[in-house]
Amino acid sequence: MAGASLLTLIDDIATLLDDIAVMSKVAAKKTAGVLGDDLALNAQQVSGVKADRELPVVWAVAKGSFVNKLILVPLALLISAFAPFLITPLLMLGGLFLCYEGCEKVLAPWLHGKHAEQKEQQIDIHDKHYEQQKIKGAIRTDFILSAEIIVISLGTVASESFTSQLSVLSVIAILMTIGVYGLVALIVKIDDAGLLLIEQPHAWQQTIGRGLLSFAPYLMKLLAIVGTLAMFLVGGGILVHGSDFLHHVVDDLTLAINQLLNTDLSFLLPTLFNAIIGFVAGTIVVAATLLFSKAKKQLRSA
């Protein structure tokens, strides 16, 4: 009897693990887009530090990301169970913050003028304060993207048991963090790999090394552009999906343009509109922040 009970228990556990694997696969597919944005943003965020500090910085951000998810997974489960109406507003606040950060980067030359450029040129990458600021900024951005990943994953298992929800969210949180920061570590060390290959005796190794050294700066510039664009895409996407009005506007505009051009651009237009809405929303938040800051200074001087 005890043996039969044990076999039944093992069978139940195996079935549960199989179900979790299937649901985790579905959740991973749905969050793949955010994963790409997360990778671009974080690779761009941790770039620019001293070469021998790149991996420690990536590791520090990865640890921060694990802490973020350690907070977000139970928080998402609690909100889903007791206050599901809060999920969308909280996500939209996070989306607005991403749009704001993106606009700050794009509009910095006009907002702060030459002073900002001079200040940026004077930054000492050996300064520990600069490094800590980079880490904090990356962890802050990771928190918002992690929240979206967790909420999307939660949506795929909303009708499942608490155990299944917890298991799937935990699997996604761990795999996504390892995947993103493992790739970020590889990206930021491409130039070091190139230098190592150049020192090798074979000509083909040296050729690859020189190619990697030439490729690395362009990749980092591309990631900087993609990372900023991702802020608008992700932030705008969150706002559109969280607002029925914006969602209908995007659908109506997509339909109208498709009819006007007599073609189907549904694969492209919603993404483009998400980016535009993200930029507009970010600009509004930046303008409001500047006005508030100006008003605050005037009150102090009065």
Image (cartoon, rainbow, N blue to C red):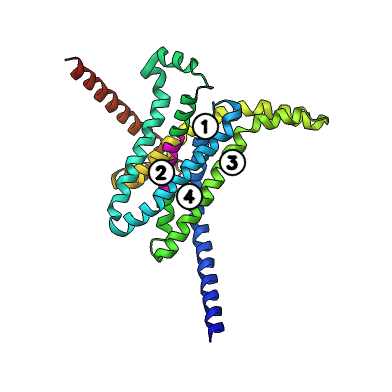
Residue 147 in the magenta stretch? The answer is yes
Magenta highlight range: 138-148
Q: Nearer the viewer, mark 3 or mark 4?
A: 3
Judge by depth and name the residue closer to the eye, 84 or 255. 84
Q: Amino acid at mark 2?
A: Gln
Q: Amino acid at mark 1?
A: Val
Q: Nearer the viewer, mark 1 or mark 4?
A: 1
Extreme residue in the left direction: 302
Q: Nearer the viewer, mark 2 or mark 3?
A: 3
SS label for mark 3: helix
Q: Nearer the viewer, mark 2 or mark 1?
A: 1
Q: Are marks 2 and 1 in contact (CB under 8 Å)?
A: no
Q: Are marks 1 and 3 in contact (CB under 8 Å)?
A: no
Magenta segment, prevailing SS (helix, strand or loop): helix
SS label for mark 2: helix
Q: Earlier in the sequence, mark 2 or mark 3?
A: 3
For disc 2, the marked residue is: 259
Q: Earlier in the sequence, mark 1 or mark 3?
A: 1
Coordinates of residue 266 in the picture (x, y in percent): 45, 45
Q: Earlier in the sequence, mark 2 or mark 1?
A: 1
Left or right: 293, with 146 as reference point: left
Residue 31's label in the rendered image is 4
Query: How far is the residue under mark 2 from the one under mark 3?
Result: 41 Å
Coordinates of residue 148 in the picture (x, y in percent): 41, 47
For disc 3, the marked residue is: 183
Question: Residue at image x 52%, y 71%?
Answer: 13
Question: Residue at image x 62%, y 38%?
Answer: 186
Coordinates of residue 137 in the picture (x, y in percent): 43, 32
Residue 46's label in the rendered image is 1
